[in-house]
Image (cartoon, rainbow, N blue to C red):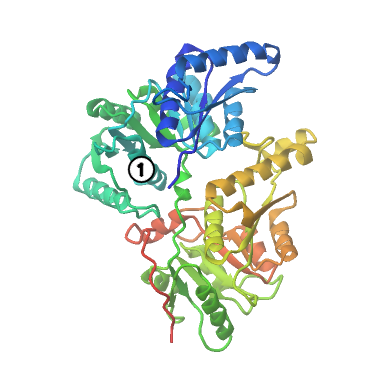
Amino acid sequence: MIPIRSVLAPTDLQPSSDPVLRSAAALARTVGAQLHILHVAPPGKEEGHSEYESQLATQVARCLDTSPSAPGADPAVETAIVYDRPYHGILVHAATVDADLIVIGPHRGSPLGARMQGTTAERIVRSADVPCLVLNRALSLPLRHVGVAVDFSMPSRGAAVLMGEWLPQLSDASDMPTLSLVHVAPIDDATTTDRLDAEVARIQNGDLGAPPIDGVRLEGVHRPGTSVPSSLAGWATDASADLLVTSTAAHRGWRRVLKGSRATALTMESPCPVLLVPPSLWRRSPIPLSTIGVAIERAGTGKHAWKWIDQMVADATSPLQVKPLASNAPLLQEAQDAAADLLVVHETRMKIYERLPADLRSLLEHTPIPVVVLRDLPDTPIRKILVAVDTGDLWYEKLGWAKRLIDRFGAHVTIYHAIDLSLSGRVRREPGGEFLPGSTAWLDAGVEDQIIPAMKAWLWERVRLAGLDPDHVDVRVGVQAPWFAIATVAQKIKADLVIVAAHDQRRAGRVRLSPVARATLERGTYSTLVVVDRARRIAEWGDRAPYSTRAEPPVEHSE
């Protein structure tokens, strides 16, 4: 469940922003969230601060009733005025107040300008990691009928699951709301219908790691058409929908100019408000861990490893099923047959600074599920974990596994980020700000006093979003090359386990191991959890083996 505890509503102080404030207040009142109202004024206009304060107070008084004695009074409001570019000021303040939802007005520029630069909402969603509600009119509460655009991708599934969780809170308990999964395609054939029916069942039953959807009437709808935004807008009109929901692709630069943004087009064509969901939000669903496949012989060198695994499983706070895998069979096929969430292997041949054995490297390049490579085993189960985090989407996977290990074993986690100051790297100059190319750090001396504090704040944002207990976490930031730094930090903190990504690809088939993963494995003798994108499992093994909330069975030991 992703709760709404904090709602941010930016305003330009014009009457056209009144519906934004009223809708944000109604949302916050309905779910019991804190409401934050923000005005972003142009930089250099600080001399007009008192006038801005007066206008903001007047608008708040006009739109909201915050009197505690009034029946159905709006929630307490925190207001702020900052001086910045609109989208950047909103991003920074959203991080400051830990916003779970940002509510803004519609794009007022031209479609061409939106395509070239991106709308404010699009630029916010690209960096904020939280949904953005774009209002072309006041939101009608309680919600009765909501449509979610689905294309069978993981981001669209995540948007559907999110709305399935939020809709019961935003509707009338006496009148069950309808959630329509709307798929736009030119032809309605049996294959499309079957896929749509399977998608409805998958989301209804909680096969993405979230609880099954309850209190909502779920249906699949095929809408014939070639233009997704226009077709969705047409469906919303015909169905009298209160809200449309869509995941965003977050295209940048020339990709946005050439391909455009369906989400932006939808906000301009839709007859109702549109909720834009970041493409990586689906990753915030819990990491499933109920079945472990162990490819280790109990005899010989594997005896100590099995003893350590047995102790680790016994110390877990909830039961795990352990399935031994035959060493003489194709390992990944065995793991698939066992419905394993995690694969464990024991590497005894490799010494520090030696190349990865060919079979281990091949396994890590082909696996669609995470792999634990056991090396030096501590006397006790996992207590100290190092997580190597970059600015890509897989921080969700890494911190999700860290949360699993904290919850199960009470481990302490150190999160390390190596700042990439190259042209391909991404950095922030202030907490909550938009990401910029790493090479911009060389334009002025701002690494120590700007970038490092901003990236530490970014890591703490990830800790909050991943639901980690801050008492079990510390964060570190450095400017060394990650392939060198990760092994050094692991040895310094005496890590029992290092979590690193094999690569950032979600497609099926062989993918070359990243230099960082390879160096992490070769430069130390600690054990390593090599994670992969969860979407890769779907691509490789198909939806017949989905990530799901399977009941966790009793521990099963081999004889």
Q: Which residue is mark 1?
A: 160
**What residue occupies the far front of the structure in this picture?**
69
Q: Is residue 364 left or right of residue 169?
A: right
Q: Amino acid at mark 1?
A: Ala
Q: Is residue 47 above or below residue 115?
A: above
Q: Is residue 110 visible?
A: no
Residue beneath the point at 78% across and 41% down: 448
Quadrant for residue 84, please give it.
top right
Q: Is residue 308 visible?
A: yes
Q: Position of residue 471 (x, y in %)?
A: 63, 54
**What residue occupies the far bottom of the structure in this picture?**
300
Q: Residues within 10 Å of mark 1 (few under 14, many from 20)?
A: many
Residue beneath the point at 28% across and 44% down: 215
**What residue occupies the far left of the structure in this picture?**
190
Residue beneath the point at 54% across and 17% down: 12
Q: Is residue 3 left or right of residue 373?
A: left
Q: Is residue 383 above or below residue 29?
A: below
Residue beneath the point at 36% across and 63% down: 550
Quadrant for residue 450, please give it.
top right
* Front residue (pair 71, 168): 71
Q: Position of residue 486 (x, y in %)?
A: 69, 59
Q: Is residue 256 above or below residue 60?
A: below
Secondary element at image label 1: helix
Q: Is residue 552 left or right of residue 390?
A: left
Count of marks overlaid on the render: 1
**In which quadrant is the C terminus drawn?**
bottom left
Q: Position of residue 173 (x, y in %)?
A: 28, 38
* Front residue (pair 88, 228): 88
